[in-house]
Image (tube, helix red, strand yellow):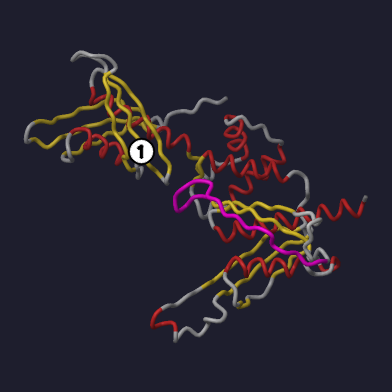
Amino acid sequence: MKKEMNKFELLSLYVESGLREKALAKITLKIDGDRHSDSKQGGDGPIDVIYKTISTMAKMEVRLIDYRLKGLRSGSDAEGEVVVQLEKGGRLFCGKAHSKNVIVASADAYVDALNQIVNAEISLDENFNEDTVREKLEAMGLNLQSKQIETVFKECKEIAGRKKEIIEKELLEIATNVMQKGDHGEKYKLTLLKVTTEEFRGEQWEQWVNKEEPTVIRLGIKIAGNRLLETPEWRTGKWPVDSIYEALGNIAAKEKKDGGLGFAVTLVSYVVQGVTSGTDALGKVIVQLGKEPLSSKERLHFGCGIDPDILVASAKAYVDALNRMASSNERDNDA
């Protein structure tokens, strides 16, 4: 397992505070190997000004949720342990430190929490590559095949334009989804999705000209790796997810020579889950599809899609289920 390197290290700390005195903090941090110094005066006491100074230097927007101090043993010279809890992106991170100097322990605990945040995040910048994926997953106990690593990397890069970083739990979810797909093949691949929806209420309702058709959708699918099928932009009376599934269902219902499955499919279940919390978290959609007409003996096929955009995740899940149906039909025909 590769040991994580800490981004931040406290090099020096100078604090002034007292009765009717504004607290002053002068701090030097090592950030990615380089020394940085800053100072602030004010805040609600020495701990507050220390944390504000460090946050400014780290250029991280975090929220202090909890601060706790306890003595490890009795006596005025006893060591104290400080535990801080920070929130970033809906996730909580806990930092700990102990020292005979409670001010120093407070600073170290805060820096420890910031390092945990940084180590849990995976930047999707130009340095992100397949080796990064492999190292992170191996550190989590997952050993994927080269083809699977490549697929995970491609899925991460696909969302890079909308999300600057992902956390380990999100990477793990993407990797697990890739592993569950197995080798069922990829007859269909989502290449384009654009959805516009609107709603007006109150006085604007009467002037709403598109109330009967509130959604506009355009969708593109690559079939069997070389044929591209794009729907024209069309307005529908259904809401976004229903509209997406209607368009994908129409493609599946086409004859096989036209790129379809040769039969109609029906949605049996649709479940939305949040991989993590926060407004920019990955959304996970799980669907089950069946062949029409649906019977108790009909085999159901599930699909899973993961994306920051819940509509894209919904489309990916449906396409994944269609691919499983296509693969199953091919096996049945070969039997």
State the residue at coordinates (33%, 32%): 84
State the residue at coordinates (92%, 52%): 334
In which quadrant will I find the N terminus?
Answer: top right
Relative to 83, does residue 282 appear above or below in the rendering?
below
Residue 322: % across, % down: 74, 58
| Other-residue count near label 1 (Cα within 10 Å), few / some / many at <14 / 14–19 / ≥20 | many
Residue 72 falls inside the magenta stretch: no
Q: Residue furthest right?
A: 335
Callout 1, which amino acid?
A: Leu
State the residue at coordinates (26%, 19%): 71
Say which element carries label 1: strand
Q: For mark 1, what is the residue? A: 86
State the residue at coordinates (88%, 53%): 332
- 96 to the left or right of 222: left
Residue 144: % across, % down: 68, 35
Relative to 200, does residue 179 appear above or below in the rendering?
above
Residue 185: % across, % down: 78, 50
- Dividing the picture into quadrants, the one containing residue 69 is top left
- 75 to the left or right of 322: left
- 219 to the left or right of 187: left
In depth, the one of 304 and 146 nearer the eye is 304
From which residue to which does the magenta span run? 263-282
- Dividing the picture into quadrants, the one containing residue 225 is bottom right
In depth, the one of 269 and 132 nearer the eye is 269
